[in-house]
Image (spheres, rainbow, N blue to C red):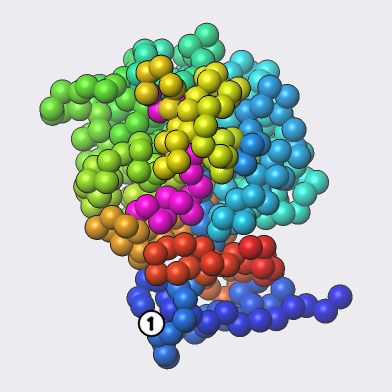
């Protein structure tokens, strides 16, 4: 079979200069920067480190199916997301391992999934049991941190990181054991105070899951856990950029405080992402309301019920803030790509354009809309 070659030309999002990307098969063979700055913006494919579902397919379905992982992979590629991390949420150990098994089977049997999914993120079950910080996670399944359980999960699939709440005295020891087993630890859905957050980082936590969400609605002015995580250079922090989880000014301030080496963009999309507005019923949380602007909430309380937007939608929203297109794209590519590489020991590459890198490319207009997606050297949208 002949290997397809092509050249993609446009403007470099990071510099505004001309950019030519030469592709052969599924790989980039050369990148030339400079020359005429004309045409659309060209960037690496987007990297989303937190996806619960998309397009009517749920990673956490009652009966998890590998076909759902394949369907989400295809649907996200059509939206510019060429690398994504399935997020398995709080459940019994049997539920968690069944979901891991489904992802593992999809990675084994579907080359597109193997190329797009580096590992799984498990969000819970070691979270706050308090209303508010717990979010929509099942209170009946919340339990203390158990490094032995995390180790058992790894027999069912590649677990890149686990989100937990370090709110008790045993947390540092458990975190150290989890990290020693090769699974990274993120802080999230927590009521831990600043001192406990600091102890968790000392024990090896390196990430913060959707900072500013999964926390009490009211906090002390200072100190509080958000300030503590913003201030600690050892934590790289995910921010949901859907326009609903964080107000624009909060998102901008957090991004500027964290800087380009620590702030990355996530969608936290659920199965209703991409659905038509209206009332829907979900596996997690029951009846929800999706509005035309992408806000997903519980009709009776107005509380958010997850995100219904893709990472591409988040890039567009961030582009419209004071941060602009270059920052939005960097937050959706460069740092999450480095995190993927770090957590796989360099075995999985994403989020950059260089000779030898996967030919995962998005072409954007000036508003940050995806015009074309190339995944593995092939146009998919």
Q: Front-most of 244 and 4?
A: 244
Q: Which secondary structure lies at badge 1? A: loop
Question: Label 1, on which residue?
Answer: 17
Q: Is residue 317 magenta?
A: yes
Residue 196 seen from this side: no
Asked if residue 223 is positioned above or below residue 206 in the image, the reply reads: above
Residue lying farthest to the right in this orientation: 1
Q: What is the total number of numbered labels drawn onto the structure image?
A: 1
Asked if residue 278 is positioned above or below residue 358 in the image, the reply reads: above
Residue 363: percent from left, percent from top: 52, 69
Residue drawn at x 77%, y 49% is: 110
Estimate how packed mark 1 is, as few (under 14), some (14 to 19) or many (20 or more) residues with alpha carbons within 10 Å: some
Residue drawn at x 78%, y 77% is: 3
Residue 66: percent from left, percent from top: 75, 37
Question: Split into 4 quadrants, where in the image is the C terminus?
Answer: bottom right
Horizontal side of 313 relative to 169 (left or right) equals: right
Q: Which residues are magenta?
A: 303-318
Residue drawn at x 40%, y 85% is: 37
Residue 48: percent from left, percent from top: 51, 48
């Amino acid at each position: 079979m002949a290997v397809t070659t092509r050249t993609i030309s446009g403007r470099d999002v990071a510099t505004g200069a001309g950019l030519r990307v030469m592709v052969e098969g599924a790989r980039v063979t050369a990148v030339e920067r400079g020359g005429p700055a004309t045409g659309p913006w060209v960037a690496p494919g987007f990297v989303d480190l937190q996806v619960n579902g998309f397009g009517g397919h749920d990673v956490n379905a009652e009966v998890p199916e590998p076909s759902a992982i394949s369907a989400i992979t295809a649907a996200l590629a059509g939206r510019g997301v060429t690398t994504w991390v399935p997020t398995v949420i709080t459940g019994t150990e049997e539920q968690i391992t069944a979901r891991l098994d489904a992802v593992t089977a999809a990675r084994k049997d579907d080359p597109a999934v193997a190329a797009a999914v580096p590992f799984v993120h498990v969000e819970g079950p070691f979270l706050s049991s308090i209303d508010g910080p717990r979010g929509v996670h099942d209170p009946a399944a919340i339990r203390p941190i158990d490094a032995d359980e995390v180790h058992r999960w790894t027999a069912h699939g590649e677990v890149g990181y686990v989100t937990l709440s370090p709110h008790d005295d045993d947390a540092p020891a458990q975190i150290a054991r989890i990290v020693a087993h090769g699974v990274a630890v993120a802080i999230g859905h927590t009521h831990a105070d600043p001192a406990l957050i600091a102890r968790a980082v000392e024990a090896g936590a390196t990430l913060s899951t959707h900072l500013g969400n999964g926390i009490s609605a009211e906090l002390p002015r200072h100190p509080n856990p958000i300030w503590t995580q913003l201030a600690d250079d050892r934590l790289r922090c995910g921010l949901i950029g859907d326009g609903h989880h964080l107000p624009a000014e909060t998102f901008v301030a957090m991004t500027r405080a964290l800087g380009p080496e620590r702030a990355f963009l996530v969608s936290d999309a659920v199965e209703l992402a991409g659905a038509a507005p209206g009332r829907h019923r979900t596996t997690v949380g029951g009846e929800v309301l999706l509005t035309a602007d992408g806000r997903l909430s519980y009709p009776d309380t107005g509380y958010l019920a997850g995100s219904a937007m893709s990472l591409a939608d988040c890039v567009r929203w961030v582009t419209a803030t004071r941060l602009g297109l270059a920052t939005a794209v960097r937050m959706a590519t460069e740092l999450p790509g480095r995190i993927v590489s770090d957590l796989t020991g360099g075995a999985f590459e994403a989020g950059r354009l260089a000779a030898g890198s996967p030919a995962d490319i998005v072409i954007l207009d000036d508003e940050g809309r995806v015009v074309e997606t190339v995944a593995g050297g092939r146009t998919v949208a």
